[in-house]
Amino acid sequence: MTDTPLDGIPKTILVGEAGDIREIAVLYQEARELARGPMLVWLGGYRSDMTGTKAAELARLAEEQGLACLRFDYSGHGQSGGAFRDGTISRWLAETLAVIAAHPTSEIILVGSSMGGWIALRALEELRKQEQAPKVRGLVLIAPAPDFTSDLIEPALKDEEKRSLEERGYFEEPSEYSSEPNIFTRALIEDGRKNRVLQGMIESGCPVHILQGMRDEDVPYAHALKLMEFLPADDVVLTLIRDGDHRLSRPQDIERMRAAILALACP
C-alpha cells in the first residue's frame, strides 16, 4: 500500500533555518508490506520536476516491484516553495539530504538525471559521513552533469554574459524545453566550484550505471567519459546511446533506465 498515490497530492517538508525556511514538496510511496529492497530516490535536473516522464516511470517501477519510492522538487522547482534564483548546488543538496533523512530506511538507490547526477554524487559523499544514514546500494546516472557550472558553463561564457553576471548577478539564455529562459546566477556558479567532484577519485562504494546519449547537446557524451575517469574501475557501467538526446525519455530509453535500476535493486 502506498502512502501517496503515484500522481497524488504531495506532502510538504520544511527545510532550512529561521529566515531561510522553504517548503519542499514530496511524493512518497511506501514499500509493499513484507517487500524487501532499497528505496528508490529520484533526483531531478535543473528546472525539472518530480512529475516528469522519467520520474513518473521510476515511481511506476517501484510500485511494480513493491519498493518504496521518494520524489521531491528542489526549492524553486515544481511544487516546492522558494525562489529559483536563490538556488545553488549546496542549497539543493541540503534539501536532498533533509528529504532522505525524513524517510528512514536501510538502503537506497539514487537515480539522478542531468544536474541530479551531480547532486547524487555529492549526496553519496555526504551520506557516507553520517553514521545513521542509509546505505547507498547503487547509482543510476542519466546524462549526468557533475561540475557543469565550471566545466560546461564557465568556459563557454560570452563577453555579454560575463558582464551580466558582474553587473546583474545572473545571465539568461533561451531554453529548448520551456518558453521561459534559463537563468544562471553568480551564486550558483561560485557555489558550484565548492561542490566539484571531478577532482580526484570518487569513492563510490557501490555500483554505478551511467546512461548517456551521444546526441546530447546540453551535456556532451565526452563529459560522461570524463566522469568515468574519476570512478573506480570495478562496478561501473557506461551505456552510450548513439541516437539519444539529453532527455532520454523515449520508450527505449525508459526501458534502459528500468533495466539499470532493476539490476541494482533486484540482483
Image: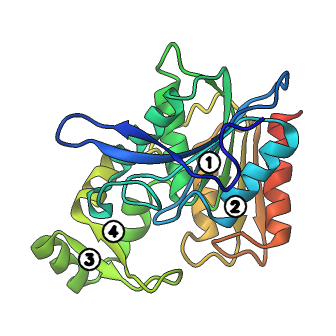
**Label 3 neighbour load within 10 Å: few <14, some 14-19, many 20+:** many
Q: Earlier in the sequence, mark 1 or mark 3?
A: 1
Measured Cα–Cα span from mark 4 to mark 2: 28 Å
Q: Earlier in the sequence, mark 3 or mark 2?
A: 2
**Label 4 neighbour load within 10 Å: few <14, some 14-19, many 20+:** few
Task: Name the residue carrying label 3.
Answer: 171
Task: Name the residue carrying label 2.
Answer: 54
Place residue 211 in its image quadrant.
Answer: bottom right
Label ID, residue 183:
none
Q: Is residue 230 left or right of residue 75?
A: right
Residues at discs 3 and 2 in contact (Cβ within 8 Å): no
Task: Name the residue carrying label 1.
Answer: 42
Q: Secondary structure at mark 2?
A: helix
Q: Residue at x 67, y 37 (%)?
A: 3
Measured Cα–Cα span from mark 1 to mark 4: 27 Å
Measured Cα–Cα span from mark 4 to mark 3: 12 Å
Place residue 81 in its image quadrant.
Answer: bottom left
Whether residue 182 is situated above or below residue 103 in the rendered picture: below
Residues at discs 1 and 2 in contact (Cβ within 8 Å): yes
Whether residue 154 is situated above or below residue 179 in the rendered picture: above
